[in-house]
Amino acid sequence: MSGDRAMEGNSISYQKKPRIMWIDIMRGLLMFWVIFGHITEDKAQIVYIYSFHMPAYFFLTGMTLAFRKDQQLGAFVLDKFLGLMVPYFVLNLYAAPFREWLEVVGEANSQSFPDLLFGIMYSNADSGYKMASNTLWFIPCLFLASVLFFCIKKLCSGDMRMMTAFTAALVFSCWVANLNHGGGGPSHYRGAIFSVVFVLAGYLFSQHRVQIDAAVSHYKGIALAAVPALLVIGWRLAVRNGYVSIIHNEYKSLLLFYASALVTTLALAIFLMLAAKSKAILKVCKPIDFIGRKTLPYIAFQVPFMKLMWHYMPGTFGTKAMPWLLLQTVILYFGMMPFAWAVDRYVPRASVLKTWIGAGRKRLGSGNVQYQEEYRK
């Protein structure tokens, strides 16, 4: 999203962290399926798309989580709060006029401003209180899943076997307690608990990414053949399990849900690792890479834009049959790029906020020193 920033005198210097392009491309492709999944009314398509698109985002979060050995829980929570929750509140603010617009044209139920504020704080539309954009539920849920995973990692001292066993025990306990049925609670905390499995899987993948990448490069033919095989397996498992939804906290068989999501996600990862070997493919995928870097605005505004399109152009964009269904997805997917770029510029970044906090502490510290010196005099 943005690079590290450090104070040097009165200026701010920027040092960007290197990004793995195929991961951003995967985020971008997942956003395509998110939009398609919100438009389609075909039950078979919904079952398959919902079986993997949000779990894969949690997986990628696990891949990109960076921990310092000496990092404490408070520092990690602050980092994640600034990086996820501050944008969550800001994007709700930006989306509020669109929510009002949808209410005026009858595409959203009317809601008072206090109820809207409660909906933003509660972050679960199943409560009856809506956010400015209900698709923003994912951000607080991701925040909770990331913090929970950090706690598990700290508790298990980074031992992967202990982390796996602890996570399995946690999920099993929640399943026995029937927390996987109906309603996710504030900020979808129940969905965060069940999704920590994907964060763990992504983190495990990241620990062996170099070796996996080398194996994929060395055995290209086998890897290429494995992709469609894994996709078919993931699809069959998803069909057998039926409709699942993290936002509604419905998973049917947890084992089938985890298996179908992880198999499909692994297939996508292997395919994109192979594709990333080609400079020509990377060049063609630059727009998708861009969208993968701007997923937060897409999460916030895709559904409001979708509903406005349906309202003002029902003859064209109100049609849910092919090929209009696919065409709507493509138009919205690429058409939002300029808007996403503009909004993204005005979403506070964690690095900037941390710089402000650091500068504020520095000023407060200087003031305290000056006060102490004057007191001594």
Image (spheres, rainbow, N blue to C red):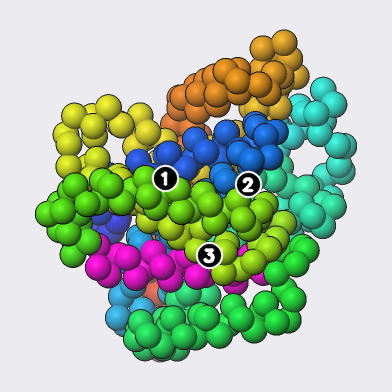
Q: Main secondary structure of the magenta part?
A: helix
Q: Are marks 1 and 2 in contact (CB under 8 Å)?
A: no
- Chain-order first, disc 3 or disc 1: 1
User: What's the residue type where badge 3 is placed?
Assistant: Tyr
Q: Quadrant of the C terminus?
A: bottom left
* Residue 181 occupies quadrant: bottom right
Amino acid tagged 2: Val
Q: What residue is rendered at 74% in x and 60% in y? A: 122
Dots 3 and 1: beta carbons under 8 Å? Answer: no
Where is residue 151 shown, x and y percent of the image? 48, 81
Q: Earlier in the sequence, mark 1 or mark 2?
A: 1
Badge 3 or badge 2: first in the primary sequence: 2
Q: From this view, report whether residue 368 is shown above or below residue 264.
A: below
Which residue has dot 3 on it? Answer: 258
Task: Where is residue 178? Give x, y as percent.
Answer: 74, 76
Tell me: 89 left or right of 151.
Answer: right
Q: Residue 272, image x and y in percent?
A: 30, 45
Judged by depth in the image, the label closer to the viewer, 1 or 2, is 2
Residue 162 figure quarter: bottom left
Q: Secondary structure at mark 3?
A: helix
Labels 3, 1: front one: 3
Over which residues does the magenta segment extend? 188-209
Which amino acid, by three-letter code, is at mark 1? Arg
Left or right, 244 with respect to 297, comes to right
- At mark 1, the secondary structure is helix
The Cα atoms of the two marked residues, 3 and 2, are separated by: 14 Å
Task: Check disc 1 and report the residue beneath it.
Answer: 27
